[in-house]
């Protein structure tokens, strides 16, 4: 799925990437609001399992450049592309059939805020979600995030796959389909489009039914047009506004999941947790349970915010602990259709730092000193300590070492870093040693604590002290001189040397 650049990669890859770039630039130029077109384009990848010519080997994925063309909300006015309009939007790299004119009656793809906000659209011109300004950058940058598909200049990844309607086999969705097998309404071609922008804070999967496919009865001219652009109507979409989420320990967290589908159709919901290769169902709602829909599985602390009228299927987790970390997958089941969205939850608890001794380290001249910096209460484990020196004549790195990392019963971590100062000289008095801690929960700056070095015995003369001493000595000298001159005028010479000594 992901075009990785490995030296051994297939030679097809570079042309594909170039193609992608071309499409991106094409899409970007035509997606400007000033464009005369009534549809918003988004470059995409069409990914399917290669039809490996009957090979027994698991067939490789094939991916081709594709284009989504989102018509304005509703089935009405702008729902249809005029003849020639689609061709004009189509970059040459996109093969016939790889452009999808998406009709979204629910409007989910138009404004992630509008649908959810319950008619909060106001006078705003609706925009497709991939042109929504990102609300805030609370979503963390994920360097290990697997971006799927091509995506656009705005960091949206987009992928379209073929989809086949089928019965779900989980018990909480088994009752949805009825007995009569696949109804005729499921005939035709189905696709699923997945759009994701972790930075903008959303992910959507939309199951689409290709409605504009040529039928034998349609006139030939019509048929040709339809094969260039596939018109597809969104039947079910599932979205999240929290694709990446982090929480401190003990907090409650809401994993957002919303959906829109045909009204009046029974649905089921499943929330699955996956972490470190293990998975389990955290919560399940069976919409076809005898006697009405009910939650059939619920782990302790998990609660479903279910509202069929607004399409809410969000999950609340109470008192988040380290074991809650992982990927949460919200799956929405309709009869014969299901789509899902994933939200990744990270537990981030910043460490406490305690530097000892504090606030002063008192050292005898020319002897070394040891300090300890305890880092505790953090999650995950990845905290590190660096030591630094400020002022004095000290330079170079400090010798340091670490204790083992211990995990508390609550799951938080603790360790201690030790540093040894080299033998210190009086001029190091007043310098400071710093313990700097970095951890994912602390952000860029990290956390630091410092301690000031006092050299024993040299509670050293500061500038003010020196000036003060000089003034006192000077005054004393003057006084004594006056005194001796009065009392022992004959001994003036000897006493003068005495007072000089005092100075
Ligand atoms: C679902 O309901 C919760 C609680 O009222 C709310 O915070 C959340 O935004 C809703 N989500 C959706 C997708 O409607």
Image (cartoon, helix red, strand yellow):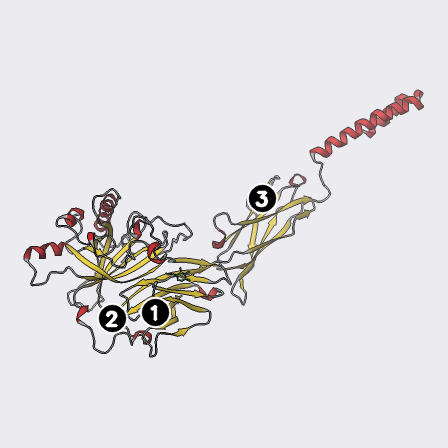
**Label 2 crowd (10 A; few <14 / some 14-19 / many >=20):** some
Q: CA distance from mark 1 to mark 3?
A: 57 Å
Give the residue number, with chain letter if any, for mark 3: 389
Residue 297 seen in the figure: yes
Q: Is mark 2 in CB contact (under 8 Å) with mark 1?
A: no
- Lateral position of residue 282 relative to residue 169, left or right: right
Question: What mark, if any, has residue 478 been given in the picture?
Answer: none
Measured as percent of width and height from the top left, residue 171 is found at: 32, 76
Q: Label 3 neighbourhood size at 10 Å, few (<14), some (14-19), many (20+)? A: many
For the N terminus, the image quarter is bottom left
Alpha-carbon span between mark 2 and mark 1: 14 Å
Label 2 and label 3: CA atoms lie apart by 66 Å
Which residue sits at x=71%, y=45%? 456
Checking the image for residue 336, the label placed there is 2
Q: Nearer the viewer, mark 2 or mark 3?
A: 2
Query: Is the CB atom of the residue marked by disc 3 within 8 angstroms of ligand 1's nearest atom?
Result: no
Q: Is mark 1 within 8 Å of ligand 1?
A: no
| Residue 269 tag number | 1
Q: Quadrant of ligand 1?
A: bottom left
């Amino acid at each position: 799925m992901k075009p990785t650049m490995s030296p051994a990669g297939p030679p097809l890859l570079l042309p594909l990437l170039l193609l992608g770039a071309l499409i991106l630039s094409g899409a970007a130029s035509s997606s400007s609001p000033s464009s005369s077109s009534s549809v918003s384009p988004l470059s995409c990848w069409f990914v399917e399992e290669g039809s490996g010519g009957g090979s027994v080997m698991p067939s490789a994925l094939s991916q081709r450049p594709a284009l989504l063309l989102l018509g304005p909300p509703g089935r009405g006015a702008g729902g249809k592309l005029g003849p020639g309009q689609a061709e004009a939007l189509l970059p040459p790299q996109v093969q016939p059939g790889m452009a999808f004119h998406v009709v979204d009656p629910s409007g989910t793809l138009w404004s992630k805020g509008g649908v959810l906000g319950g008619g909060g659209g106001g006078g705003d011109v609706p925009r497709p979600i991939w042109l929504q300004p990102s609300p805030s950058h609370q979503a963390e940058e994920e360097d290990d995030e697997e971006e799927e598909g091509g995506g656009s200049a705005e960091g949206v990844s987009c992928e379209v796959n073929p989809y086949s309607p089928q019965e779900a086999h989980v018990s909480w969705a088994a009752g949805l389909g009825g007995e009569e097998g696949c109804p005729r309404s499921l005939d035709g071609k189905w696709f699923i489009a997945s759009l994701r922008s972790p930075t903008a804070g959303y992910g959507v999967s939309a199951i689409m039914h290709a409605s504009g496919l040529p039928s034998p009865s349609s006139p030939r001219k019509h048929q040709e047009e339809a094969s260039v652009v596939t018109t597809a109507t969104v039947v079910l979409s599932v979205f999240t506004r929290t694709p990446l989420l982090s929480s401190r320990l003990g907090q409650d967290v809401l994993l957002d999941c919303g959906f829109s589908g045909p009204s009046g159709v029974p649905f089921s919901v499943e929330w699955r947790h996956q972490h470190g290769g293990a998975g389990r169902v955290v919560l399940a709602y069976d919409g076809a349970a005898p006697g009405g829909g009910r939650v059939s599985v619920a782990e302790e602390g998990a609660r479903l915010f279910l509202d069929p009228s607004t399409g809410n299927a969000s999950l609340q987790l109470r008192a988040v602990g380290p074991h809650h970390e992982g990927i949460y997958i919200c799956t929405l089941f309709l009869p014969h259709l299901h789509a899902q969205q994933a939200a990744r939850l990270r537990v981030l608890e910043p460490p406490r730092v305690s530097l000892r001794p504090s606030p002063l380290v008192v050292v005898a001249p020319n002897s070394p000193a040891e300090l300890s910096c305890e880092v505790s209460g953090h999650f995950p484990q990845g905290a590190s300590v660096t030591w630094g020196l400020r002022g004095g004549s000290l330079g170079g790195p400090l010798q340091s070492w670490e204790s083992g990392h211990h995990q508390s019963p609550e799951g938080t971590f603790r360790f201690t870093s030790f540093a040894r100062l080299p033998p210190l000289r009086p001029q190091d008095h007043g310098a400071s040693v710093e313990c700097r801690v970095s951890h994912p929960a602390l952000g860029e700056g990290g956390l630091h604590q410092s301690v000031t070095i006092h050299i024993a015995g040299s509670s050293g003369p500061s500038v003010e002290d020196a000036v003060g001493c000089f003034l006192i000595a000077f005054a004393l000298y003057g006084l004594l001189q006056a005194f001796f001159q009065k009392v022992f005028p004959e001994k003036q010479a000897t006493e003068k040397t005495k007072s000089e000594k005092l100075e």
